[in-house]
Image (spheres, grey):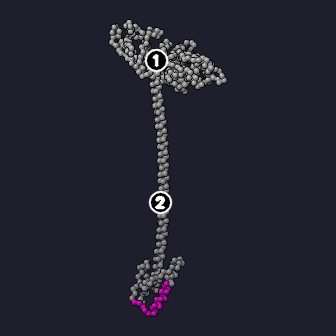
Amino acid sequence: MALRKELLKSIWYAFTALDVEKSGKVSKSQLKVLSHNLYTVLHIPHDPVALEEHFRDDDDGPVSSQGYMPYLNKYILDKVEEGAFVKEHFDELCWTLTAKKNYQADSNGNSLLSNQDAFRLWCLFNFLSEDKYPLIMVPDEVEYLLKKLLGSMSLEMGLGELEELLAQEAQAAQTTGGLSVWQFLELFNSGRCLRGVGRDSLSMAIQEVYQELIQDVLKQGYLWKRGHLRRNWAERWFQLQPSCLCYFGSEECKEKRGTIPLDAHCCVEVLPDREGKRCMFCVKTASRTYEMSASDTRQRQEWTAAIQTAIRLQAEGKTSLHKDLKQKRREQREQRERRRAAKEEELLRLQQLQEEKERKLQELELLQEAQRQAERLLQEEEERRRSQHQELQQALEGQLREAEQAAQRKLRQASTNVKHWNVQMNRLMHPIEPGDKRPTTSSSFTGFQPPPLVRRDSSLKRLTRWGSQGSRILSANSSEQKSLNGGDETPILASASQEDKLDPAPEN
């Protein structure tokens, strides 16, 4: 599955290069040529007649990538066998097709990249790019590759400078989320990421990183090796891969002298110095033991650690160290993305809760304001009722005072009338005879004290005179009272008891 994905990336570039009109479709004649070249470079046997028949020109017109995929999967990718072809030759075929259309090096020779270096960077881009089309490389992988190249040249880029460069590239590719391969190559050709680096140094660094990531070379360099039969020491160029340790006559790797197969049962051990050789170690396999010597202790440590890594990969059933590392980096990015999405979701939830809280606080403030307003209205109504009550009370008190004053006036008037009546009654009761003086009497009727009755005149003469005199007094009193009361006929009668008490003075 991993091999199929890698092959599809390169084939996608070849297919899009044949799409001259950028319509997403390629003519059948071009697809026939592409399929034939793929059969050849992948070492897949095929029937040329059947290929010709399948891509015969008809009225259907060009074929889209989706239309070509069924044929590609069934007749090419399903028949690919890993190790039966040279992956580099396959990549060179696809690079030749796509570079002819999309990549133009500077004709004046100002480009830092040669065609071979551009091809290797294109392969590195495909290896580190995401499994999505169109292919892009995320900024994290661009940073990883730049650090690898700088590390190969024993150079370091400042963290701030690197972040600024990545930020500029991210802004240029913010719509896609990463860099396309042509933006990636322009980044190197412009020299923005590798200021002051020579062309030869850059080429050697690209070759080293290409061998490490694409060809799975874990470590390479010169070591002294002891022969198995002749037991002599010879210097060889060793190249370590996850499955084997190969050694050559020179670093050009043209003359292969042997291969040490590695599996989970192998081991590496450090040996003491002897026979004039120092920094020795050995690799033990199921069949034999290989003795080697490094130039110094540091090199021995690096080689033994790298060989142990290869043995560990074999024990875990993995064929590539950097494929495993790439998958781990991708999982870490996905975890960061999930954490970022979860954090954004949490922030959004907190924001919504905050908005809900603010909304409820606003509602509470509105309710409190309404309550305060209701209390103010209630207080105003209470004040109004209290004011009305006070006004009513004051009005009633005024009316009461007026009534009291009127009553007092009437009482005084009545008292005056009574006094006047008493005077008149006194005058009537005690008429003045000719030649008599009016006696001084008290102003009140209640102070009138008639003389005591000495004896009752029982004679008819006295009764007659008393009856005629009483009739005159009553009629006179009635007339005066009527005149005093303004014409009102309110007779004032004396009680029988008073009449009994009122007895004329005795005659002398």
Q: Residue type at mark 1? A: Asp
Segment colored magenta:
455-474
> Residue 216 — which label?
1
Is 254 in the magenta? no
Label whose residue precedes the other's in the sequence (1 or 2)? 1
Q: Residue type at mark 2? A: Gln
| Residue 190 vertical placement versus 496 (above, below) | above
The C terminus is located in which quarter? Answer: bottom left
Q: Residue at x 54, y 26 (%)?
A: 176
Is 466 in the magenta? yes
Q: Secondary structure at mark 2?
A: helix
| Residue 113 vertical placement versus 174 (above, below) | above
Q: Residue at x 52, y 19 (%)?
A: 80
Q: Nearer the viewer, residue 290 or 365?
A: 290
Q: Residue at x 36, y 12 (%)?
A: 280
Query: How many residues crowd around disc 1 within 10 Å: few (fewer than 14), some, or many (20 or more)?
Result: many
Q: Nearer the viewer, residue 356 or 403?
A: 356
For marks 1 and 2, give the one nearer the viewer.
Answer: 1
Horizontally, residue 284 falls left or right of residue 62, namely: left
Q: Where is residue 462 drawn, in percent x and y?
A: 45, 91
* Residue 191 seen in this snapshot: no
Residue that mark 2 sits on? 390
Query: How many residues crowd around disc 2 within 10 Å: few (fewer than 14), some, or many (20 or more)?
Result: few
Q: Secondary structure at mark 1?
A: loop
Q: Residue at x 35, y 9 (%)?
A: 277
